Structure formats: structure tokens, C-alpha cells
Image (spheres, rainbow, N blue to C red):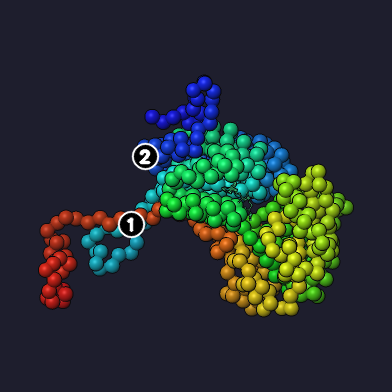
Amino acid sequence: DIVDPFFIRSQNQQLLPLTPSEVVRNARRAFRTNKTKPLKYRESQLKALLKFFEECRTDIEDALQRDLRKHPQEVNLAEVILVTNDIRHSLIEMKKWVSPKQPSKRLINILEDVEIHNDPYGVVLIIGAWNYPVLLTLGPLIGALTAGNCVVLKPSEMAPATSSLLSKTLTKYLDPETFYVVEGGIQETTELLEEKFDYIFFTGSTTVGKIVHQAAAKNLTPTTLELGGKCPCYLDNTVNIEIATRRIIWGKIMNAGQTCICVDYLLCTTEVKENFLKSASKVLAEFYGNEKLPSDMSKIISPNHFKRLMRLIENADIAIGGEYCETQCLLSPTILVNVKKTDPVMQEEIFGPILPILEIQNCDEAIEYINDNEKPLALYVFSNDEKVQKRFLEETSSGSVSINDTLMQICTENLPFGGVGASGMGAYHGEEGFKTFSHQKSVLKTMLSPITEIGLQSRYPPYNESKIAM
Ligand code: NAD
């Protein structure tokens, strides 16, 4: 029997949440009933997810305010619109995606039907990150539901208000037999990873990504790893510096720089750096007036992360910013100059509103520096020189490239979103999300008729020369 979806009763009559193995067992039983497979069921779940956004909009804003002091406009732009657009897009396209595909046939298959079926994997685990705790848990969920899977969702414990909202409220919208939320941190994630899933989708750091990958390997479970790293931004003197600066700064201060694809550091010549600094002061005044610690900007997620950022700027040369409030975990947009490749700020992903400027001689040196380091999740190129743009596209490898803008590459459902090398493997968004959570099953169907058998004689023993000639 399926255990009560939310709770089991312990011996002393206390209500306790299900253990990870009970969750997986229930989800697997539900999957075996085949209830997630009809298109109508999948549509009903996507519509329920959309309803959650419509009816719980204020709760979502409140949770993100409590977790990250996220401004409602950022919530709208980067957490709600991206997910709801993706749901609507999937609802429109899913019939086409789900239906079997007929590949072209060759003479050898002329009497056979060949098809590619998109099978749901079964029970999938989605582990989310805290920086966009709605987008990065419910974004992958869209692909998983569209593909007809049962889902176990593990939101990040670092964003507890959002985690609790998803666990207490979202579960009321989706089918409690096929959708589960397990709250918790390292211990709960470790326990979940001991279970056998059919697919694991992880968003988080490269370090934990390796742990997840190893745990998945024990069961040969396929995984998507959406990881992090340092995203470079190259800027040259062929662009309108004011517009370029506005876009680069916006790409840095969104969610206080706690964005996996945010600009991590700037690569430019000394001359461009001087112009950028002048523009940056103007742009920051335009954005925030005289506010040193802008009230529109998110806070740093935790005191530990705040201290980590303070250590990165401790002995640095601060050209702009550097103001902070430790008790509220606030840090102003901070630009560092005279940065060396060996500085601590260049050794790890910053994940905060700090922008180091690394001076280079030319585009060759920038490309060489990027290729000397791990493959980034995103690469930004600000240049109107098409030869320069082409060189970055052809001579470097990264999850995505955006030319003359930041962050916007994730806003198009038709562009797959994912990393390469240390920044991850696999991708999602739109049809790519559906494909990620589907197994492409090859199907061949033919007739058992004596007439077709005549044409197949050459494949049967005894082998001889006359048959080879056939
Ligand atoms: P994290 O790797 O610390 O945590 C992610 C999840 O893993 C959490 O749910 C946590 O409970 C769990 N976890 C942590 N330590 C674990 C352990 N030892 N064993 C098992 N599970 C463990 O990442 P984070 O701090 O939530 O997010 C920040 C990182 O994520 C950054 O590197 C950022 O670039 C990256 N990120 C990537 C994307 C993307 O789409 N590629 C998006 C957002 C964040």
C-alpha cells in the first residue's frame, strides 16, 4: 500500500515526516501505476504549478524577502516570470515533444516501423540551490513533470523560508502521490543520495557536484549537474562604454552578485579600465543615488558567506565601494583594481557584489587566461569588433556566451542552459528540459510474415558466398 503521502505515524503516535527511503518507495509505486504518463495528467500538474504561482505570489515574495531580502522586482524578473513562461511554453509545445518521432528510414528498414519514444525515467531527484531558490528548484521541475516523472524535490536549507513554502504549500497543489518535497541539509541530502533514483538533477557548487556524481555512479544513475565557477567578462574600446558598463554592473549586482552566471571578473586594458571606472561611478549613482548600501540590493545569504567575501577584499585595492554592514550581511557594489592573477579573489568563484578588474594587454592574453582556467558557465564579451567576437566564440569553451549583454541568455526557453567541464554537464529549459528528463527509446516494429522472411535469408546461417552477394 502507498503510505500516507506526507506523514507516517511512529509507535508513540507522533506525526513524523517520511524517511527518504519511504518517499522513494511511495514515488516508485505511484510511477508503476502509470498515472504520470497520460498527456492530460502531465498538463494537469503543469497547470497546478502555474496556479501555485498565481495564488501564492505574495507568499513567494515574502519568502524571498526573508531569505535574501530580494526586491519584488527581482523576484518578478528572475524567479517568477522565467518559470511561468517556461511552464506556458511547455503547455503549448508538450504534445509535439511527447509524441513519438519517426526518423527517416533506409532501404534496410523499408518494411519496418521505426520510432523514437520519449520515456519518463521514473523517479527523479531534483536538488536545488539557495540563490534563486524558486527558479532553480521549480525550473527543472517543469521538464521533469512534462516528461511524466515522479519527483522528489530537495530545496536548499540555506533559503529556509522558500524551502518551507515549497514543502508546505506547493505540495497542496501537486499530486501528493507523485510529488514529494524533502527538506533538510547535508544529512538529508546524503540520505537521499543513498537511494536509487532514475535521474538526479543537481544545482550547486562544483565540490558538491562531484559528491552527487559519485553517489549517482554507484547506481549508474544519469545526472545533470548545474554547477558554478568564475564567469569572465572581456571589455574592449570598440563599444559604447556607458551602455556596456550599465549592463556589466547590472549583471554583477543582481541578487548581490549571488548568481551562477553573473560576471565574476573583468578583463580589459589599462585604458579601458580607466573609462570603465568613470562610467561605473555614474552608473551606480544612476542606480542607487547616494545610497552606499542600496536598499534595492539583496543581502548576502549568511554570515559565513559574508565573512568569506570580506576576506576576499581584506587586502585588496578598492576603487569603488567596499562599504558594508556586518549585522545585516550587506556589502556595497565593490570594484577592485591592481588585481593579480594570484590574489585570493581570482582563486574562487566570488558569488558576491565584488568585481575585480584584471588588466590584460590584448584579446590574445584574455583568451589565454580564460583557457588556462576551468571552463566557465558563462562568458561575456563586450566588443563591436566581429573578429574579436568570433575569436572568443571559436577559441574558448563555456556553457554559454553572451555578446554585449549579461544574464539574458537564460531568458530564452529555446536556448539550452547548462555548463561544460567544471561548470557542469547536461542542460535544461524548454524542450531541452523535457529531453533531459526523458529517455529516448528506440522502437522497431515489424511483421512476422513469410513474405518478409524471404528478403531476410541472407542474415541466417549457414553463411555462404551466394548469400553474401544478396
Ligand atoms: P552547494 O553545493 O553548497 O549546495 C547545494 C545543495 O547540496 C544543497 O541543497 C545542500 O544541502 C547540498 N549539500 C551541500 N553539501 C553537501 C554534501 N557535503 N553532501 C551532500 N549534499 C550537500 O551550493 P549552494 O551554496 O547552494 O550554491 C552555490 C553554488 O551553486 C555556486 O557555486 C553557484 O555557482 C552554483 N550554482 C549554479 C547554478 C547553475 O545553474 N549552474 C545555479 C545556481 C548556483
Left or right of 216, for residue 344: right
Mark 2 burial class by Cα count in 10 Å: few <14, some 14-19, many 20+: few
Q: Earlier in the sequence, mark 1 or mark 2?
A: 2
- The foreground one among 292 and 88 is 292
Across and down, in percent, residue 69 comes to 74, 43
Mark 1 burial class by Cα count in 10 Å: few <14, some 14-19, many 20+: few
The disc label shown at residue 442, or none: 1
Taking the image as drawn, is residue 146 in sight? Answer: no
- Please give the name of the residue rendered at 54% of the width and 53% of the height, measured from the top-left corner: 211
Left or right of 394, for residue 334: right
The quarter of the rendered structure image containing the C terminus is bottom left
Residue pushed farthest right?
Answer: 290
**Does any atom of ligand 1 lie closer than 8 Å to the CB of label 1?**
no
Across and down, in percent, residue 127 comes to 55, 47
Instruction: Find residue 370 and report its image quarter.
Output: bottom right
Q: Is residue 205 above or below residue 80?
A: below
Left or right of 251, for residue 97: left
Label 2 SS: helix
Across and down, in percent, residue 302 comes to 72, 46
- The foreground one among 260 and 86 is 260
- Please give the name of the residue rendered at 61% of the width and 64% of the height, measured from the top-left corner: 376
Q: Amino acid at mark 1?
A: Ser
**Does any atom of ligand 1 lie closer than 8 Å to the CB of label 2?**
no
Label 1 SS: strand
Residue labelled with disc 2: 32
Q: Is residue 114 above or below residue 32?
A: below
Left or right of 116, for residue 145: right
- Please give the name of the residue rendered at 75% of the width and 61% of the height, measured from the top-left corner: 355
